[in-house]
Amino acid sequence: MFLVLFVSAYANAQGYEMVEKFRKKYPDEHLVQLVHEKKLAISLVGKEIKILSTTHDRALRLSTQGGGSPKEKVSFNSFMDLVDISAYTLVPNGKKFKKEVIKEFVEKDELSTSIFHDDVRSTSFYFPSVVQGSITDLSYTISIKEPYFPIVLFFGDVPPVEETRLTVTFPKNVEMGFIYRNLSENDVEIQKKETGRGTEIVISKNEIPAIKLESGAPSIRYFIPHLIVYIKSVEFKDGKQMVLSTPEDLHNWYSSYVGNVNAERDERLVHIVDSIYDPEKEEIENVQSMFNWVQDNIKYVAFEAGAEGFVPENAGLVCEAKYGDCKGMSSILTEMLDIAEIEAHLTWIGSRSIPYTYDEVPLPVTDNHMIVAYPTSSGYMFLDATDNEIPFGIPTAFIQGKQAMVHLGDSMFVLENVPVLEANMELYSDSVTIRIEDNSILGTGRSHFTGHLRSSFAHYLKGMEEKDKISFFKEFYNKGNNRFLIDDLQISGLDDRNVPLQIDYTFNIEDVVRRHGSELFINMNLDRFNEGGEIESDRELPIESDHLSMVQSSITLELSPGMEVVHLPDNSSYSGEEFGYSIEYFGSENSIRVDQGHYENVIITEADHFGQWNEMIKVLNSAYKELVIIKINE
Amino acid sequence: MENYIRIIVVLFVCWNTSLSAQDLYVSGLDWEEAPELHDLGEFSEEDNVIVLDKQVIEYSLNDDGFYMYQLIHEKRQLNSNEAIEEDNKRYVSMSGVVEVMEMKARIIKPNGEVVELEESDFQDAVDEEERQSYKYFAFEGLEAGSQIEYLYLLKKYPYSYRGRRAILQNDEPTIKMEYDLVSDTYLIFKWKSYNSAPEFIEDTLIEDKTRHYVELSNVPKFADEESSAPLAHAGQLLFKLDRNLLNNRSELSSYGPYADDLYKIIYAPLDKKAEKDLKGLAKTIGTSMARNDEEKVRKIEDYLKKNFVLVNANADQLEDVSEIIKSQIVNETGFLILFTNLFSLEGLEHQLVLTCDRTILPFDPDFECFTFLDETFIYLPELDLYMDPTNAGLRAGLIPAEYTHNNGLFIKQVKVGDYVTGLGKTGYIEHAPYKVTASDHFVKAKINSTMDNIEIELDNKISGYYAANIQPFYDLLKEDEQEDLNRGIVEYMVNDADEVKEISALNGSGDKMMIEPFIVHVEVSTTKFLEKAGDRYFFNIGELIGPQVEMYQEEERTMGIDDDNARSFYREIEVEFPNNYTVEGLEDLAVDVFHEIDGERSLSFKSTYSMEGNTLKVVIDEYYRDVQYPLELFEVYRSVVNAAADWNKKVLIMKPKS
């Protein structure tokens, strides 16, 4: 039942001048965060570690509606209990404020469309009377049941934050760890106090300006300063208990979740492996067959439910259900390989949204995914069957460049970096032959997609109706102008992940050839990659792509008898370490060809390269504006 | 609206509880004990085929009251991983459900093996805030070629007895479709079929119950075409309870009593405190400063939509005038109450209007059925304005377009002596005129003599539905968000420009909407509209109007045009050419494509030009006066749309004077 009961009381507050003060200080802001505070209280009861984490947020509305919805939500999962929550609005009332306390909170199961079983619950409520000058105040305390989960405090938010503060209290025999990201100890104020019962550390920073988010930027963990606080160890009388201090500690803890997985062989799975395994083939070919079988037969479904979030499902159960989360899919693949006596290992990894390595941050916040590592003579091959279109041997795009923790045994592991697939493996190539008929162009083309491009195109195309495929590629190619129409389209390689996706098509484009007297004018740059790709000059945040990329396009115009080339534009190119392009014209008696090549060699383009990028786009744009002139001899 | 319906149920039906319980027809229905894979016939190439779509609705009055029993029995074949992905989970809303009498599901694998889901596979989720709960289950172990089958029987509050819709088509092809309407024999239903849906057939063999049914086979999936309303073309049966022979009450689903009932809820007398609070609110809004009635309406609307938070929840205080004013939190009914009370206080004549989405099925004035009373709006007859009290992105003069060009039930206040009540009458809700919704471009360009720069000034004026969700929220954005928005609107002009000298917006606030257009002004230096060929230049003048919607691809068309709203695009372009170049190709700029209905242009794209000295002036007027065009006018419609897209490619050739 949704119910908000208001209890009125007059609170002592500084008065309405405060609003005026902040409106002057932040004339463009609708909201100012007055306090963002976390308190972490650690205590010991016998050998049990008690952790209470309190969050306190206090915000002032500088305008009535611009500050966003007055709805608030606190989310937690089964590793946590919500111990206490209180919230109120201070409503301006003359020179004072009137306090309206929220008495009831609504709990709900979070139904996520991407996650099927889910233990996330939330408590939500509306702040009443949120008008200009209102102050909203929320405090809640969560009890964290496992000592392995760190708390993270961000220094900075979309509104400006006046006070950001972390208070940690812990007994003397507890050792705490502090990891600073995107800031250092020198950027904050630290106060340390020793008391009879233990230590209190207060870390704070005031007046943090508003952070502007920009589209296409990497996750906020890449650039917003934050602090990760965790328990390293506890010194008991009978010895030291390590919690999480090193990657070894993290691996030890993780091992306890995977130790009992696949303890028993599943007979059905043994039969399946028998039917797939071919002793005549090389080992790696058998690995590929097993990997493809998992991609074909096990559907990926995300789970997030308490300890299940850490324990992989037994391979037999995954096989029966025909679906699994990343851990279930890794479990069945390692088990199948084990049945075939091929070495492979469960492997933890974080997606690219988490910019940490295990060396830097040996904590469960560093990963959110599981894959399989298969050792080859040239190092580990990382297998991620959660993408059922990924070609064998290629890591999924979102884990490229990340450090992985490969589980070799109970206290054995190795940290390895997942490679980034090179640009020439992420190739889109397109080769087109055209001829002119009146003011139109008729042409045939063939394209190939490899690497992650192949898998994303395969995802789009599967399940798409035929006529939608035509409109999809009409949009994708859009050669010349939007009069580009596809007459015929053939897609091949869609059912074999390990070959490039191939598109054969014929097309026509009306109104793209201009005739003037006895001359024809045609812009041979029917494809204009990166046109409109200029980066805004005031952009500050880097830009992240899913993967590297390379484009090779070749357009050949076959000349009819009587046609003579009188003008070919100059070639144009830009070649940088991180990105570049080239446009080259080739003329002969019977044809004109223009070749375009483009490459991007970095996943994250940092802001200091934007200038070069824009310079390149400028040159490229003027190259795109050059026409070929053909004379018609009657 | 559920609250009101519940009251009506109590008033008209539930007093007949002296009856003994009758056996339910639905409880005798089950799935086959030994299921088999079904032959897909003509749909064998499809990914996802509904083998059986059966629904039985039974209304019955028994010991514990009047309830609706709903049986859903579906069987589907999933032939690809994508189809499995889409359909391997089912969420069943428990909204209005009193009891889940049965729920089961099974898989028939391609090899014929049958796996039934266990009780523990059916799980619950609750969302207390939205007052929604769900049962959900997932089919595990599916492989391509599997069939999934589920059957559930729900006992529900009979909210829908005054109007329920059966849509006899799905978004996937259906081999067998069955829809049954069953009731106690003394409950008499009326129905009407739309879009050549079959009529209900009476089951003459059944005893103790009345049963009507339709059966269809091999029903293709909905067509999917641009600017069309496939649902409004699908076969539909609408039915409603008309009579109860036990108490001799008839016209149980007529609008009359409902109008009265709704009126009593929305216009319930206010207590002294509420009256005082309401006057206080009017003072805060400053209604007395308004120069006329329209300004009053707009002030009230803008204030309430900007300052009150709409929540989707049921609670008394969200509908109580004093509580709403205090907390500024309100639900949909609360907003209606607040608006109408403020209008009454200010002496603004108004009516409630109830109607439905015409893209699902237009309101039928000849068949009173509550399915048509889907949304409530306010009509101000003196000003001839419709308004949507809950949509913060719209202002009076606009309600969601799919509810216009449709009939509706108008409820107005009638006084009979001292007795005040609401009287319902059906009438037509006009769509907003084509000039209201516009995106107009005013461009001034000057090309320099060295052909390496064009100075351009553009005003893009946006109004009506095109300004909805932009104009009223603009001043709530931060400066950088406003800039991003401005850039997004004139993207074609600023992208890759050499220099953006100015970009700004005018009239970005809710109180300006429907009075002034939202204007984005931009000034750039650019070369992007020039292409070079040796010593000649091609000036892409067409690109100055920005990219246009096109319908070039020819596809077989089966439905007429159903646009959301009428609309207009007016452009004035002025180009100053350098003295040292000649300009050719001007004659191509004049285009006139149109269609007249009753001697008046209904669809039109007309461009004209004039050259004075070095200055070219072009005027383009494009508009779509109506929202619906029959199938036979499709090609005409297409030619007007494409005329604009063609104009976008117009080019002038510039040659150096020798």
Image: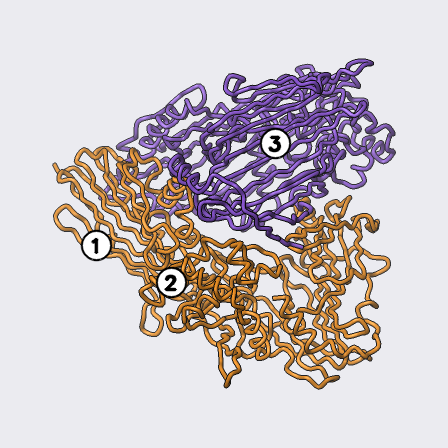
Chain colours: A purple, B orange
Is disc 1 on the same chain as disc 2?
yes
Answer with mark 2 or mark 1, whichever residue precedes in sequence: 2
Residue holding disc 3: A499
Q: Residues within 10 Å of mark 2 (few under 14, many from 20)?
A: many
Q: Eyeballing the image, is B1 above or below A537?
A: below
Query: Which residue: 41% across, 57% down?
Result: B284
Q: Quadrant of the C terminus of chain A?
A: top left
The residue under label 1 is which amino acid type? Answer: Tyr
Q: Chain of mark 3?
A: A
**Quick one: B370 or B47, which is closer to the camera?**
B370
Is disc 2 on the same chain as disc 3?
no
Residue holding disc 1: B609
The residue under label 2 is which amino acid type? Answer: Thr
Residue A237 place in picture, x, y as percent: 81, 14
- Please identify the quarter of the rendering in which residue A180 is found: top right
Q: Eyeballing the image, is A336 above or below A508?
A: above
**Quick one: A631 or B548, which is closer to the camera?**
B548
Point out the frontmost of discs 2 and 1: 2
**Quick one: B414 or A348, which is closer to the camera?**
B414
C-alpha span from label 2 to label 1: 48 Å
Residue B607 place in picture, x, y as percent: 26, 57
C-alpha span from label 1 to label 3: 55 Å
- Left or right: where does residue A241 sit relative to residue B249? right
Residue holding disc 2: B287
